[in-house]
Every structure is written in C-alpha cells, then in structure tokens.
Image (spheres, rainbow, N blue to C red):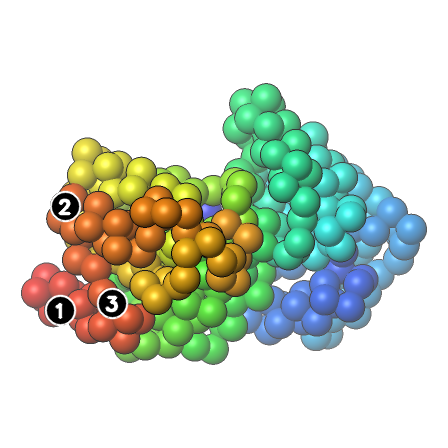
Amino acid sequence: MAIFLTENSKVIVQGMTGSEGSIHTRKMVRAGTNIVGGTNPRKAGQKVEVEGRSLPIFATVGEAMEQTGADVSVAFVPPAFTKAAVNEAIDAEIPLVVVITEGVPVHDTADFFTRAQAKGGRTRIVGPNCPGVASPGKSYAGIIPADITGPGRIGLVSKSGTLTYQMMYELRDIGFSTAVGIGGDPIIGTTHIDALAAFEADPETEVIVMIGEIGGDAEERAAEFIKANVTKPVVGYVAGFTAPEGKTMGHAGAIVSGSSGTAQAKQEALEACGVRVGRTPSETARLVREVVEGRG
C-alpha cells in the first residue's frame, strides 16, 4: 500500500499550461502518474500533448472531477493566484490537493486551510512550498524525482525538499512506501502528525523517517504523538544544529528565537519519546539501516 497517493489516483494539474506546470506534468507522466487533465479557465476546451497522451484542459477543478473522476490536484500556480486555486479545489471537494508553490502569503494559506477545515476536512492539503507526495512504483504528485529510489518499506515525512531527495537516495536499496514533503512554511496543511498517523495505519510501512528543522514546535508535538500513538520504529533528523539565533534559514518557518525551536531541543524531545535521531542526513540513514536490519 501507500498513503495519500496510490496507483489508482487520478491526478489533475492546476496550471498545467504554465512553464513549471508543463515541465513537471511531463515528468509525472513519465514516472507513471495517471494524469487525466489540467485546469486553466482561459484555455478550457483545449488539449495538450504530453508524452504521447492528449490531455484535456478544463475551466475548473469541479468540471475536471466530473468528467475524469480526478481525486488529486497538483497546483503549479503563481503565489498571487494560489489562494483562489486552492479554494476552488476545496469547494470542489477533491480529496487531495498538493500545493507546490513557494512564496504563498501566510494569510492566504491561513484562509484556504481554514476553508478546508470548515468544509469538514474533505480535502487534504499538502504544502504549500513543498515537493509533493511520491509513492514509488505507483504515482508521483509534485516535483520529487522519480529515479532516485524504488518501492519499499520506509515511510518518510519531511519539511525539507532537498533532504527528502537525499534520504530517498541514500536508502534507495531499501525503498519507500510513500514520501511526503509537507513544506516548511509557518502554516501548512498536512503535518508530521498527520503523516505519522497514516504510516502507522499502513501495513506496508515498517519504519518511519521524520525530517524536521529549526523553528516552531511541530517536532516536539510530533514526539508526544509518537509516544502515545506510534508503535512502529521512528528515526528522526532535525536540520539546523549550527543555525544562528534570530536568522531565518531557508524556509520561512525555520527561525530560532532564544531557546525555542532549536535543533538540540527538538532532538532531546524526540529521543525522550524513543526516537533515534541522527546529527546528519547520512547518520540518520545509517540508523534507519540498523533498524531495518534488526527487523530482518
């Protein structure tokens, strides 16, 4: 199995005809993702040729769902238009929308996240500012490279895109059930806890890797959730052990204030709940190997 995204997922791309959307639509199709169409109200009714397939462009997400049965949307929409695009997907009640866009204003994210909650959580949001979701051998929704790993037993949830790729590459011989890049903005849809709960329930995920970073308290809250609810082994990594206080590092949410949000504090919280934590990505991969080998 996999979480959130499977071989049965039918994917549309909001912004398919834009530069980024078209590039990554081709890559997703090559990776085996079942792309069934895209949206662009100015180009509705047209078709786009992608890797030998003729994909229809629809005016709205709702129209695309009605005509194709789509249940996943990947949004490659400029920041100024992302709120409207995600709200459209939420109103159509598509089960999953993956928001790749970087630079979405925080109040816009708060708006569409609140809208999704008000609709009863019928739409799961991953992102924004994330690499997406990959279930190797089944489907890819986003920008995670499809050639760095294969299907396997590890579940990965990560704030960082590049660290997602590195961990998938370092553990490529073991493989992954699903990798979820949740993004590092101050407000995001799917959290570490959401992914941890899904991996705990997934029978094909045997070991979970959780990658966090400085700033906020998401990792501490995840540690408490692991202690109370997760029976599978979890290995963690927290980026930013050498980050200076008060300086944003990469993601908008990655900022240390005093003793709050430091990598050391997060490591201690995770280790107190039984999570093995690496000091570097490579050390983290080694710890995962030890866990996998110990489980046979």
Q: Residue at horizontal 75%, vertical 60%?
A: 16
**Residue picked out by circle 1:** 290
Q: Amino acid at mark 2?
A: Ala
In whole angstroms, how far apart are the C-alphas of marks 2 and 3? 16 Å
**Among numbered discs 3 and 1, the one appearing first in the sequence:** 3
Report the side of 127 relative to 175 (left or right): right
Q: Nearer the viewer, residue 116 or 217?
A: 217
Q: Which mark is residue 28?
A: none
Q: Give the alpha-carbon distance from disc 3 to disc 1, as whole Å.
A: 15 Å
Which residue was labeled with disc 2?
Answer: 272
Q: Nearer the viewer, residue 43 or 119?
A: 119
Q: Place residue 191 in its image quadrant.
A: top left
Q: Amino acid at mark 1?
A: Glu
Residue at label 3?
A: 279
Mark 3: secondary structure: loop
Q: CA distance from mark 1 to mark 2?
A: 19 Å
